[in-house]
Image (cartoon, coloured by chain):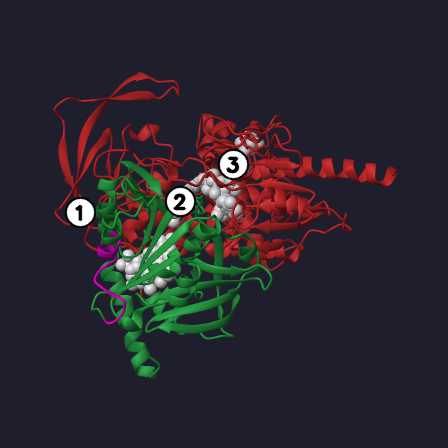
Chain colours: A red, B green
Amino acid sequence: MDARTITAKERMAIPRQEMPAQDPQVRIGNFNEVNLGLTPEQAQQEALRCIQCKDPVCIAGCPVSIKIDQFIKLIAEGDFMGAVRKIKEDNVLPSICGRVCPQEDQCEKVCVIGKKHKPVAIGNLERFVGDYERMSGQKIDPVIPAPTGKKVAVVGSGPAGLSCANDLAQYGHKVVVFEALHELGGVLMYGIPEFRLPKEIVREELEGLRRMGIEFRTDVVVGRTITVDELMEEEGFDAVFIGVGAGLPWFMGIPGENLVGVLAANEFLTRVNLMKAYDFPKSSDTPVFDCKGKNVAVFGGGNTAMDAVRTAKRLGAEHAYIVYRRSEKEMPAREEEIHNALQEGVEFLLLTIPLEFIGDEKAWLTGVKCQKMELGEPDDSGRRRPVAVPGSEYVLPIDMAIISIGNGSNPLIRQTTPDIEVSKKETIVVDVNTMQTSKENVYAGGDIVTGGATVILAMGAGRTAAAAINEKLAGTAKNFNEW
Amino acid sequence: MYRIVSAIFLAENIKKIEIEAPRIAKKRKAGQFVIVRINQNGERIPLTIADSNPETGTITIIAQGAGKSTRELNRKEAGDSIADVVGPLGTPSHIENFGTAVSIGGGVGTAIAYPTAAALKEAGNYVITINGARSKDLVILEEEMKAVSDEAYITTDDGSYGFHGFVTQKLQELIDSGKKINFVLAIGPIPMMRAVAEVTRPHGIKTVVSLNPIMIDGTGMCGGCRVTVGGEVKFGCIDGPEFDAHQVDFKNLADRNRIYQHEEKEADDTFAHQCNLTGQA
Ligand SMILES: Cc1cc2nc3c(=O)[nH]c(=O)nc-3n(C[C@H](O)[C@H](O)[C@H](O)COP(=O)(O)OP(=O)(O)OC[C@H]3O[C@@H](n4cnc5c(N)ncnc54)[C@H](O)[C@@H]3O)c2cc1C
Ligand SMILES: Cc1cc2nc3c(=O)[nH]c(=O)nc-3n(C[C@H](O)[C@H](O)[C@H](O)COP(=O)(O)OP(=O)(O)OC[C@H]3O[C@@H](n4cnc5c(N)ncnc54)[C@H](O)[C@@H]3O)c2cc1C
Ligand code: SF4
Ligand code: SF4
Ligand code: FES
């Protein structure tokens, strides 16, 4: 079918293209990516499903307003590189966002096709063009203008920091990214597992940023190794962007939570993803709890919980449970990940809360006492509040418990830079139009501002900040010339 | 990569290593530590900064071979490099002029206590140091400790040097002699720190210990280093590593530190086996 001659009826007859995926029984035995990507033919077919709305509402559903109709049109016409360029006007990491964006709650949720049929697979198409560019070997590096002579420090190398650095470099500023860990990429590297986002993709994106002249310094904990003030006063940075994410995992505060075998999802995922503990003791010196034949329960219902439970399954867990206090509908995780987890044999214990962890005489975890819940009246967030069912307590035998109920914000920056205003929740307060903090020339964005959110929101914040920083620095540059 | 400037054994299995790390050298305060990763496959291990020189841009660590990573570290020589050194991490020791301060170190804990003992001296305290080892050849930093002490004692478990007995016995002796002690710092194996806490508790002497929970990132991100202090969950890497000894749940710490015992042994045995094969052990 040709993009120019296709009739409306023919368009509507095209089914939403299913992305090929590894068989569930096979993939629980490896860490390779689950989804295999659309073929070029599939991508073009899918693109033809878009009716090119006059008023493309899908764009309003995207936090960074990607010109969705336009990039899809280019795919339909077979101009894949043109489609990449179009997306990159608004989003520098399409391979990544196409994989991890909660599309069903954003762009695809409002796509008009979705009213009668399944919505256009915008996320899968975005992923397709991002991968096409990477694999075509035709990667086009942006043209960097003459140096402005201004220097900006970016703290944290997650999606917020990387997108901010990218734009700042394209404005011609010198950018140095400081990262606390030994690897760059933030949650993209240490949190989201290989089977959902191959690390090679993140590394290639980082290479692209290096080619643009951005400098990266790992092993620097801002607040400890150097403070924000020192960056500006001693190291000569004209502005600082803080994108340190939401560190600090929360615990539930129930009895037995300090037994051996109870850990935060961040620890479990960091051991496996960042430290490659799945290869212990061969090519990694970092161990991880041996899940083989064991019962593992993950507490929570978000993306992190799904990642943790599916990782446990891949490490050989006999039973891998999700224990969640509401119902499946309320789970904040991406629909696709919930679906994938179920396919992989993860057992969902819904409307269930843990009351207490139980251990043996050596303080090793042996089980968790749970209670069933019922859905009551909606709470402030509009979700129906779960209420305990009396007498429904029971003990679930488990060997490892992974807590995945969210993160607070890391105290290092606020403790060492007291003039940056923080909210009651200890997130950094910014002007949402510029991402400027209460401190002159210091900007912030991503999870440290919003609390745990999404990759695309963090990237959007990084870009907003870069634009504001650029304007601010240009302003100061003008003053300088007038002198 | 971080270059090793010098590396010398202080005792069997305990090595003093000076590493180029200018930013850390400039910033570090007593009581802080670094996290070290030896090579691309290495785990991240925390080690206290025993000393630093901002002029030469170097820091000194003193590591005891406890398992695979520390043993591998202790095979490094001057001129070698290690992949990562990040820090200074942790909240610095709270230093003030308490009056009479006793610094107690057990084993490699002596190395960890040394910088804080020196800072206590600097702040005007009357400093008494008690450093314990299993036997004479395991005594470390004797001269350094003497230099920052008003009174310095060495204890050995087997009596081969100094006072015959445990550090707690020496501490008890000092207390019984009627000496007014205002502050005690104790760093060493968990049973030792716990025993010191029990000695000082009845006398209400403010006592601080430096805890050694298992760590990964050292920035508060993973929650692996959590310890129970005064019934509350604290993160060793950002709230600590120093805590009020009378509030610490030592049993919980000891239990939790055993989580990877089986795996650690496996790694260490494989490493020892490889060393034997190459004849380098
Ligand atoms: C397991 C998991 C799965 C997720 N899945 C999804 C998903 O499918 N889709 C989605 O959209 N979102 C997902 N998210 C959320 C998403 O990853 C985050 O919202 C996003 O990464 C936030 O980006 P950021 O740049 O603000 O912070 P981060 O990605 O957290 O990066 C912050 C970086 O700053 C560094 N840092 C911290 N403190 C300092 C310091 N003092 N000095 C220097 N560096 C510092 C950190 O080491 C880190 O590298 C997931 C999160 C997790 C944990
Ligand atoms: C804040 C802090 C400061 C320290 N300072 C020193 C020091 O100055 N000199 C010194 O010799 N040792 C120090 N340690 C202890 C040192 O980190 C461990 O001995 C080392 O990590 C053991 O690793 P391994 O592979 O050699 O041994 P393993 O065989 O892996 O473990 C031996 C024991 O060390 C502990 N351990 C293992 N992995 C870690 C880890 N990632 N983090 C913390 N503990 C672990 C466990 O309790 C284990 O039983 C310190 C620990 C902490 C937390
Ligand atoms: S970035 Fe996310 S929300 Fe925006 S178009 Fe892509 S998949 Fe949709
Ligand atoms: S709303 Fe759907 S059909 Fe309309 S332009 Fe956007 S993707 Fe195409
Ligand atoms: S070491 Fe990870 S939170 Fe302390």
**Chain for numbered disc 3:** A
**Chain for numbered disc 2:** B
Q: Secondary structure at mark 1?
A: loop
> Circles 1 and 2: CB distance less than 8 Å?
no
Q: Position of residue A260 (x, y in %)?
A: 23, 48
Q: Which mark is residue B99?
A: 2
Residue at the extreme top: A377
Residue A426 on the magenta span: no
Query: In the rendered image, which residue does mark 1 sit on?
Result: A363
Q: Secondary structure at mark 3?
A: helix
**Chain for numbered disc 1:** A
- The vertical placement of A310 against A464, above or below, is below
What is the C-alpha distance between the residues marked 1 and 2? 40 Å
> Circles 3 and 2: CB distance less than 8 Å?
no
Between marks 1 and 2 in the image, the one whose residue lies nearer the viewer: 2
Residue at the extreme right: A482
